[in-house]
Amino acid sequence: MSDLDLQLDHVGVAVATLDQAHETYAKLGFTLTARSIHSGSTEPGGPVVPWGSGNHCAMFEQGYLELIGITDPALYTSVSGLLDKYQGTHIIAMGVSDSEKAYEVINERSGMVQPAAKLERMAPFGPDDSEERLAQFRNVHTIREKVPEGRMIFIQHLTREVLWQPHLLEHPNGAVAMAETAVCVADLEATCARYTAMYAVEPTRHGADIAVYDLGNTKLYVLTEAGLGKWAPGVTAPMLPWVCGFGVRVKDLGATRAYLEGQGFEINEHPYPAIWLKPEATLGVVLSFIQA
């Protein structure tokens, strides 16, 4: 994996309504950006056109959370296809410094990705959102039929300074970084064979039901339904495969627990030192908080 130096860049949660998502995740203690509307190419090498989707983001010192929803159903959007499956986490994006190199390397070792496509959006800028600046990206997407677990992306940021604005990095819940993601699958062995080829890393196995990929600054859990029951007891997958959720690192886990309890959320314990919230409280996400 050192040939690409992958880092967890962001996780995307597809939501039925952006207004509800903003209200829910603000209550969870995330500082969210003002709404931004997407534009991009609908196929690799195509022109940039307006899309019918938008987002709110929670920016961390390392990585960010994207809440993505439909803003204009008359325009192109991939969000409707995601919501047809379930509301919740769909996107796992790994950061790369060179999208063309990432495509070449990952395609050669796995054959599971498409050439880089352009994406851009006007992003609110400044402490009072009085300006807008163009945020630009180049995304290498996995081929849906070959990687059905979710939208796995390898993203190159061309304008990092537009997104990582200092006033956006402080969160009432203490979040500082993306930490982990998890997927629940029917066939652990087949999924791990694909991920090992794609990421060039062997997982650590925890029995027959859980495999964990250590990808540097993040862990990716691959779970069977039995493994999901051990990792997040009482949670049932709405379908398989399912991107169960994600975890963020926080400054002080005790303070985060107190904040969430003060907001009325029910706290659950992971088998490792971390707490998590049930999908019913988070718009379909197993949301974890881990001590930084």
Image (spheres, rainbow, N blue to C red):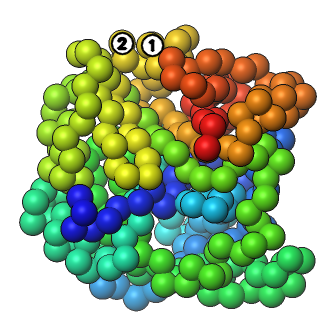
- Dividing the image into 4 quarters, which one contains the C terminus? top right
Q: Nearer the viewer, residue 102 or 190?
A: 102
Q: Which mark is residue 13?
A: none
- Which image quarter: residue 279? top right
**Residue 156 versus residue 228 in the image, above or below:** below
Residue 251 placement, left or right of 259 = left
Measured as percent of width and height from the top left, residue 58 is found at: 69, 58
The residue that label 2 is drawn on is: 226
Task: Please say if 128 is above or below 236.
Answer: below
At 34% from the left and 49% from the top, the residue drawn is 215
Residue 270 drawn at (x, y percent): 55, 20
- Disc 1 residue type (three-letter): Gly
Q: Amino acid at mark 2?
A: Ala
Residue 243 drawn above or below residue 124: above
Q: Residue at x 44, y 52 (%)?
A: 217
Please give the name of the residue rendered at 25% of the width and 25% of the height, measured from the top-left corner.
205
Q: Dividing the picture into quarters, in which one does residue 114 lie?
A: bottom left
Mark 1 = which residue? 229
Q: Which residue occupies the foreground of this view, 21 or 66?
A: 66
Q: Is residue 112 visible?
A: yes
Furthest residue in direction left, as rendered: 108
Whole-angstrom CA distance, mark 2 to mark 1, is 5 Å
Q: Position of residue 206 (x, y in %)?
A: 29, 20
Q: Secondary structure at mark 1?
A: helix
Mark 2 vs 1: CB contact within 8 A: yes
Q: Residues within 10 Å of mark 1 (few under 14, many from 20)?
A: some
Residue 68 visible in the displayed image? no
Residue 10 falls left or right of residue 290: left
Q: Residue at x 37, y 70 (%)?
A: 96
Q: Which image quadrant: the N terminus?
A: bottom left
The local secondary structure at tag 2 comes to helix
Q: Give the x, y percent position of residue 165.
A: 72, 75
